[in-house]
Image: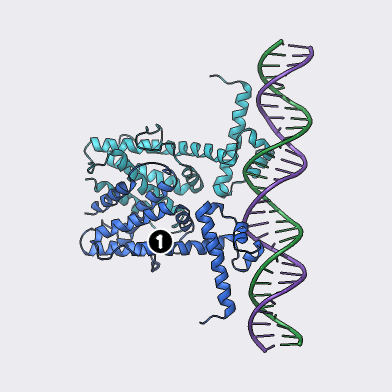
Chain colours: A blue, B cyan, C green, D purple
DNA sequence: TTGATTTCCGAACACTGTTCGGTATTTTAT
DNA sequence: ATAAAATACCGAACAGTGTTCGGAAATCAA
């Protein structure tokens, strides 16, 4: 399992390329990422990048995974000791705040489809979704919310996800430059949804 | 206000270009639209397109307005005679269905920011948003839902929009190819949110 | 030290959106 | 009808893109 010096250098070079790419994406948006500019700033020829990634899409994919990890770190900072409902609200707010503060990263993170293809397959651990799912399950167990007929914790989590994801996306596209107290409105929205579950 | 033959031909040519562009967007996604391919299929040289539109972005902008109109037509088919809450639910479902049936169109439609920059400015008439706003106002007047403290019909409408928009976007990106009974889940989600407003 | 593998680059290919100069064509004014 | 002006259109070019290929160094394993 230990890596040779060559392998270590290889991975290091990969990360250098990824870091430059991430920097450029933050600066210019991910749809404007230029591999040639990445190569320039990483001191490679354009062709050399293909020694480390098989395509531009491949770079974006790896990057989107790393960004998911960044989101997870932030969401993990929400205290587990919070009352179940309050915890769900705060998780949602962290999600939206990340989106608004890192528009390009957020959009890249969500541009690629998940590997999970149905409710039967297991939820990937250490994902933001899993975090919210756990919080929802806890709120059900504590009796803070109840499941509608035929609806399980997963469906509730998905609906919450839709709500906060939609709020995020609207802020980045349609409502870019729109002035309003979104922090407050979004908070009420999440609470309203939870209230609908008693 | 009557147009000269030249103006009429000009507008006709514009629409030919837009139609070809729309076709290609449906086929290949709007981020892959090639102006040169549009020119080929519309029997123009690439340069000639610039007699009708000042840039690719301009074409996409006009197209996104036309797509918004298409969405509006579908949402207008939801009977106004429905009970207020049921009407809101169905408006949301039409929105999501349009997104899922026309992924590229939907994404283009939402890729450009709205002209409205704050709640003070007037809502543009004949927009999907206005339609939902009216339905929400009606539901408030009829007493089917109540406004939380400090929240007005607009904020409720925005939250509903976030919910259905998020559900739509998730279906097109993260949950592409994911198998589940989304029609049912989304319906319950909207009803749950409305229930949270009593 | 030889041979194999990895790293890296220059050049090229096939694209892209856009601009510019010039030529027809069509409209407007005289 | 004629001259002038505005519009429509195109070929060629510019600067950029992602990607592939052949070959040359460098590094590793035998």
* In the displayed structure image, the side of residue B28 where residue B100 appears, left or right: left
Q: Quadrant of the C terminus of chain B?
A: top left
For residue A36, above or below residue B48: below
Q: Is residue A14 visible?
A: yes
* In the displayed structure image, the side of residue B54 where residue A162 appears, left or right: left
* In the displayed structure image, the side of residue B171 where residue B81 appears, left or right: left
Secondary structure, mark 1, is: helix
Quadrant for residue C27, please give it.
top right
For residue C3, above or below residue A99: below
| Position of residue C14 measured from the top left corner of the image (x, y, whole percent) | 71, 53
Q: Is residue B29 visible?
A: no
At 35% from the left and 49% from the top, the residue drawn is B163
For residue A100, above or below residue B67: below
Instruction: Using the image, name the chain to which the residue with label 1 belongs.
Output: A
User: Which residue in the structure is indicated by mark 1?
Assistant: A71
| Position of residue A135 measured from the top left corner of the image (x, y, whole percent) | 29, 63
| Position of residue C10 measured from the top left corner of the image (x, y, whole percent) | 74, 62
Relative depth, front residue between B31 and B177: B31
Other residues around mark 1 within 10 Å, as few (<14) / some (14–19) / many (≥20): some
- Label count reads 1
At 60% from the left and 33% from the top, the residue drawn is B14
Quadrant for residue B95, please give it.
top left
Quadrant for residue A117, please give it.
bottom left
At 59% from the left and 55% from the top, the residue drawn is A34
* In the displayed structure image, the side of residue A69 where residue B50 appears, left or right: right
| Position of residue C28 measured from the top left corner of the image (x, y, whole percent) | 66, 16
């Amino acid at each position: 399992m230990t890596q040779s010096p060559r392998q270590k250098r290889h991975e290091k070079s990969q990360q250098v390329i990824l870091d430059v790419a991430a920097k450029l994406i933050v600066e210019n948006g991910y749809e404007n990422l230029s591999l040639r500019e990445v190569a320039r700033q990483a001191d490679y020829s354009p062709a050399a990048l293909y020694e480390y990634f098989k395509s531009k899409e491949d770079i974006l994919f790896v990057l989107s995974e790393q960004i998911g990890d960044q989101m997870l770190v932030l969401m993990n900072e929400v205290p587990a000791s919070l009352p179940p409902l309050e915890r769900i609200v705060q998780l949602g707010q962290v999600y939206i705040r990340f989106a608004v503060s890192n528009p390009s990263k957020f959009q890249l993170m969500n541009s690629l489809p998940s590997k999970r293809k149905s409710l039967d397959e297991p939820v990937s651990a250490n994902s933001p979704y899993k975090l919210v799912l756990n919080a929802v399950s806890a709120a059900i167990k504590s009796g803070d919310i109840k499941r509608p007929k035929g609806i399980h914790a997963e469906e509730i989590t998905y609906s919450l996800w839709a709500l906060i994801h939609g709020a995020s996306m609207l802020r980045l596209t349609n409502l870019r430059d729109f002035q309003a107290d979104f922090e407050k409105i979004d908070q009420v929205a999440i609470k309203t949804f939870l209230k609908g579950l008693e």
